[in-house]
Amino acid sequence: MSLTQAIPALPVRDAAAAVAFYRDRLGFEVLHHDGGFAVLCRDEAVLHLWESGDETWRERADFTEKPVCTGAESFIAGTASCRIMAAGVDELYDELRAQDVLHPVSRDGVEDTDFGTREFATLDLDGNLVTFFRWVS
């Protein structure tokens, strides 16, 4: 027995807008989009997007005691992050810099970390953090 793959599922406020962003700005292909759920890929990387657009929490009397009730409350959108391993991380940085999607911490370039990666970070429309990295030998 072994685990073979993890697929991040990111909460977004508007699935259609997020799909367009990931397709047009981050270069992902749309494999499936059905209302509030989408499956995207770029090369071997796969992401799921799920719509977190429930606004009923604003009117619930028990919100302070139980803020998450449906699991799709709109305030959840933009609270996730994922890391995607990428060959050619420097070239990908150049591509995505031109799309104006970089996180402020990555605007000066790709960085080598003290934990063995070379990486940069991006933000989607809702503020989900998507970091692209490669392991450094």
Image (cartoon, rainbow, N blue to C red):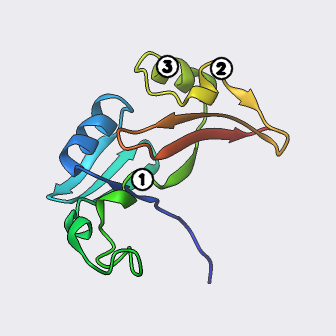
Query: Percent from the top left, x then y, of residue 4?
Result: 56, 68
Q: Amino acid at mark 1?
A: Val
135 or 76: nearer the eye? 76
**For discs 1 and 3, the disc positioned in front in the rendered view:** 3
| Numbered tag placed on residue 97 in the rendering | 3
Q: Amino acid at mark 2?
A: Gly
Query: Percent from the top left, x then y, of residue 23?
Result: 29, 36
Q: Is residue 35 left or right of residue 105?
A: left
**For discs 2 and 1, the disc positioned in front in the rendered view:** 2
Q: Is residue 63 left or right of residue 115?
A: left
| Numbered tag placed on residue 34 in the rendering | none
Q: Residue at position x 41%, y 50% from top?
A: 78
Q: Residue at position x 22%, y 49% from top?
A: 14
Q: Which is nearer the N-term, disc 1 or disc 3?
A: 1
- The quarter in which the C terminus is drawn is top right
Residue 121's place in the image compared with 80, above or below, is above
Q: Which is nearer the N-term, disc 3 or disc 2?
A: 3
Q: Is residue 18 left or right of residue 80?
A: left
67 or 94: nearer the eye? 67
Q: Amino acid at mark 3?
A: Arg
16 or 66: nearer the eye? 66
Look at mark 1 in the image and give the residue it sits on.
46
Residue 79's place in the image compared with 4, above or below, is above
Residue 69's place in the image compared with 83, above or below, is below
Q: Which is nearer the N-term, disc 2 or disc 1?
A: 1
> Which image quadrant for residue 136?
top right
Q: Secondary structure at mark 3?
A: helix
Q: CA distance from mark 2 to mark 1?
A: 25 Å
Look at mark 2 in the image and give the residue it sits on.
109
Query: Percent from the top left, x then y, of residue 102?
Result: 51, 27
> Which image quadrant for residue 65?
bottom left
